Image (cartoon, helix red, strand yellow):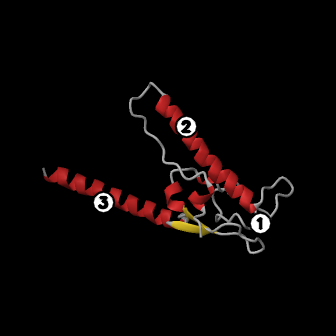
Amino acid sequence: MRRFQVVAISVLAVVAVGIGWVAAGESEDTLCIPMGTITLEALSDMEAQRSEVEFPHSVHFDYNCKACHHTWDGESPVLSCSTSDCHDQTETDNDIPSFKSAYHTACIGCHKKIKVDNKEKEKSLMTSQPELQRTGPTGCNGCHPKE
């Protein structure tokens, strides 16, 4: 019995040390992402036509980061869409969507796709109670509340 205890304690010690190494390695490779809500507002050289948008970033963590941050290499810091040479222009130019157009296309397009997918799942005879994805707003006032 004593030999079993010594072996068990030794195994636990090795596992604990291994976990410590892994945790130490993770601290160096941790990606810092904003939690909670991010306020999206018109660029400084744009005249806002509607109110700013409160974007619930943490609600979108089930999606691949590159769905929105499409130029991100997966390693370097994620830059804002308004970063130079991304979507920092106020008008669509050189086949690059403007800041406003990029957000509207990505956000509303994704929300509409989820709505269509949910309708298809509801019609499906494969399950009696399909698991539906939550979707966001597709109309102006859903994102831009009236002032």
Amino acid at the residue labelled 1: Asp
Which residue does the numbered mark 2 point to in the structure image? 117
Where 121 sits versus 115, above or below? Answer: above
The residue at the far top in this view is 125
Q: How would you rate the neighbour count of disc 2 (Cα within 10 Å): few for under 14, some for 14-19, many for 20 or more?
A: some
Labels 2 and 3 touching (C-beta < 8 A): no
Which residue does the numbered mark 3 point to in the structure image? 13
Spot occupied by residue 88 in the image (x, y as percentages of width and height)? 77, 66
Q: Residue at x 80, y 55 (%)?
A: 96
Marks 2 and 1, how far apart at CA: 32 Å
Marks 2 and 3, how far apart at CA: 49 Å
Determine the image quadrant of residue 14: bottom left
Amino acid at the residue labelled 3: Ala
Query: Along the polypeptide, which appears first: circle 2 or circle 1?
Result: 1
SS of the residue at dot 3?
A: helix
Where 56 sits versus 111, above or below? Answer: below
Spot occupied by residue 35 in the image (x, y as percentages of width and height)? 50, 66
Q: Residue at x 55, y 42 (%)?
A: 115
Query: Along the polypeptide, which appears first: circle 2 or circle 3?
Result: 3
Which residue does the numbered mark 1 point to in the structure image? 88
SS of the residue at dot 1?
A: loop
Q: How would you rate the neighbour count of disc 1 (Cα within 10 Å): few for under 14, some for 14-19, many for 20 or more?
A: many
Marks 3 and 1, how far apart at CA: 53 Å
Where 81 sits versus 118, above or below? Answer: below
